[in-house]
Image (tube, helix red, strand yellow):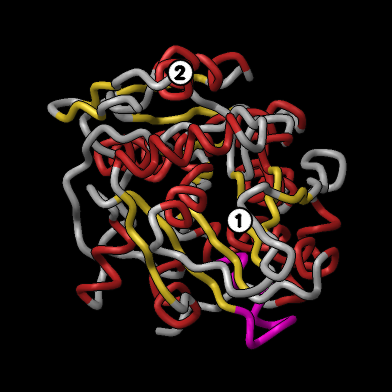
Amino acid sequence: MTVPRPELADILAAHQAIRGAAIETPATRSVLGTATAPLWLKLEILQPSGAFKLRGAANSVAMLSPEARKRGVVCCSTGNHGTALAFAARASGVPATVCVSELVPQVKVRAIKAQGAHVVQKGQSQDDARIEADRLVAEDGMIDIPPFDHFDVIAGQGTIGLELLRDLPELDCLLVPLSGGGLAAGIALAAKTIKPGIRIVGISMDRGAAMAESLKAGHPVEVIEVPSLADSLGGGIGLSNRLTFDICCDLLDDVVLVSEDEIHRGMQALFRHDRLVAEGASAVGHAAILAGKVRLTGPTATIVSGRNTDMDQFTRVVTGKSVTLGNLVVKGK
């Protein structure tokens, strides 16, 4: 059975629905660009929750019926979606529970709790957290708002593409951090409807990249999650994925994978040259450009997706120190 996808009208409606919760973020020039191929940075780090996820979460909460609001919302998350849903739910007076795995950094767990949500931390993968969220839906009747594979979430994230093409209609290419595909799917739906010839490149880490592996296989697959500087890009896409896999399969022009060393360098460049404090997932565009895996051939924008980083780890990266990620040591430079 075909599952309806968000259309431009849904993304336009989401743009109105999230006013007052999420902000319209600016796009600024990066020093990595050139006169003929400028690089623009869409600063989702300025969202009140610290990441782009607030757009999809706020839109989903706005669409709830009064009866659904009383039952409360639940999600599984690698961190940023949980913080965003907690923020949006609290602003609307809706109870929220967020399920996370043991791999989610404590800085993100604390951020979720600070927004008033109840946190359940269980298991070694997002799939384990998903099981717990499903239990709460089945037993307590809570409303599930997943982090990416959801009509209203995708429409909310698509507002980024809407703003970029409104403010920068000359853009030829968008570099989008790629995880479960909600961000990439939403942006691609908006951008390719407005400008069909625009190029959309999804970028992820080269270890445990669920959407990239699924696109390569031609169907959703499970991956082993491992610690990463781009921890927000971790987690599976779900073997029963309903929306984001097909949209990414249809609309992404390319997928690029970057190593932890390259993400390390990208984070340094984003901080040292563009003066931005951002998490590793925000730096994958810089990582791919610096590694020569993406060439700037015309006006390009990359999504600086979030700032909710472990500041101890961030400080080590930007000061050129080594970082240990499980059994991998990323040497400083």
Q: Classify mark 2: helix, strand or loop.
A: loop
Asked whether residue 149 is drawn in magenta, I would say no
User: Does residue 135 show up?
Assistant: yes
Q: Is residue 187 above or below residue 106?
A: below
Q: Is residue 167 above or below residue 50?
A: below
Asked whether residue 191 is drawn in magenta, I would say yes
Is residue 119 shown left or right of residue 85?
left
Q: Nearer the viewer, residue 275 or 56?
A: 275
Mark 2 highlights which residue?
A: 319
Magenta segment main secondary structure: helix
Q: Residue at x 53, y 59 (%)?
A: 176
Q: Residue at x 21, y 31 (%)?
A: 124
Q: Nearer the viewer, residue 65 or 163?
A: 163
Mark 1 highlights which residue?
A: 302
Image position, residue 262 (x, y; %):
35, 44
Q: Which residues are magenta?
A: 185-198
Image position, residue 105 (x, y; %):
38, 22
Image position, residue 282 (x, y; %):
53, 42
